[in-house]
Amino acid sequence: MAITHKASESSTQLAKACPLNTIGVVGAGVMGAGLAQALAQAGLRTLLIDTSDSILGAALDKVKNNLRFQRLLQKDSVVNPQEVIARIQVSTAYDVLSEADFVIENVTEKLDVKSQVHRQMEEACPAHCIFAANTSAIPITRIAAMSRRPNQVLGMHFMNPVPLKTTVEVIRGYHTSEQTLQVAKRLLSLMGKEAIVVGDSPGFVSNRVLMLTVNEAIFLLHERVAAAEDIDAIFKNCFGHKMGPLETADLIGLDTILFSIEVLYEEFKDSKFRPCPLLKQMVDAGLHGRKSGRGFYNYAD
């Protein structure tokens, strides 16, 4: 027990010595924009990377709008939007990550896409840099297998909207070191967020339960057992949930829901994770939820 305690103390001390001056965010979609905002609001220099200037411009616009909305809701807010935006540097080149101490990857839930991104991160980042995968279902150990430094890879599953959520599901992969976990916890603490560390399993804790719930709610709609509003109302009014499962699906994005449930179905080979045909149809039709203007509810008006 004493040896373990000393090892833990040593890891904590080393973690405190690791710099957290510059944080990279790869992927400037809804989650990436929210992460860049949360990091910059915490006073951290943030490098936001994506494939085109138009995507990066839209992400910065989203951050600006979020900050304006935040100031309207919180009259006593001391956040200076100009200072927050000034801390975010955008780029389509991975080379800027040569200055990063910690990088959070947020690209689509497809392993081949993540594989390409992690290879580029590996080449660009300094040796001490830690890699966090913000994934909702893909096993972290599999992602770490792409790296020459798997002990510096972990999962950080942020919830949407990132600036408003105070808890993050942190996933320890097979090779993830204690020092890497401690640095990740310190970063989250700087952001005003709590880390809950879980083991590596497809979907982890949150999405192994949530995706099954959302998919089953879609089956209920598909089978005409109840309307979307009524399904959500039961969860909100009977169980005290802030949002129903279909509202939650629209917020996350139905394409992301489908990717995640397909990963769980493939990983566990269990029919309970089979994607509902209605979910597939809606994704094919481009009805992806809030981000497309329409999902189970209409957001276009």
Image: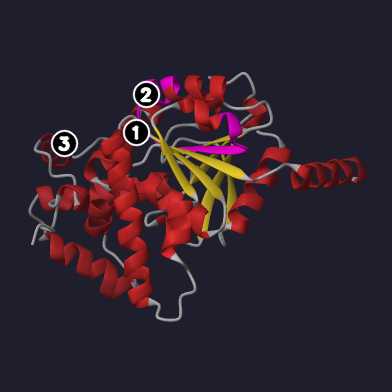
Q: Earlier in the sequence, mark 1 or mark 3?
A: 1
Spatial separation of the CA atoms under disc 1 and disc 2: 7 Å
Q: Give the range drawn in magenta.
A: 98-116
Q: Which amino acid does label 2 sit on?
A: Val
Could you say which is closer to the camera, residue 231 or residue 249? Answer: 249
Q: Is residue 129 left or right of residue 158?
A: right
State whether residue 175 appears in this view. Answer: no
In this rendering, the answer to whether 236 lies above or below 165 is: below
Quarter of the image for the C terminus: give it: bottom left
State whether residue 225 appears in this view. Answer: yes
Q: Point out residue 112 in the picture as x, y percentages from the top left corner.
A: 38, 20
> Which residue carries the number 1 mark?
108
Q: Residue at x 45, y 81 (%)?
A: 76
> Which residue carries the number 2 mark?
113
Q: Are marks 1 and 2 in contact (CB under 8 Å)?
A: yes
Residue 102 within the magenta-colored segment of the rendering: yes
> Which residue carries the number 3 mark?
280
Residue 140 within the magenta-colored segment of the rendering: no
In this rendering, the answer to whether 96 lies above or below 70 is: above
Mark 2 vs mark 3: in front: 2
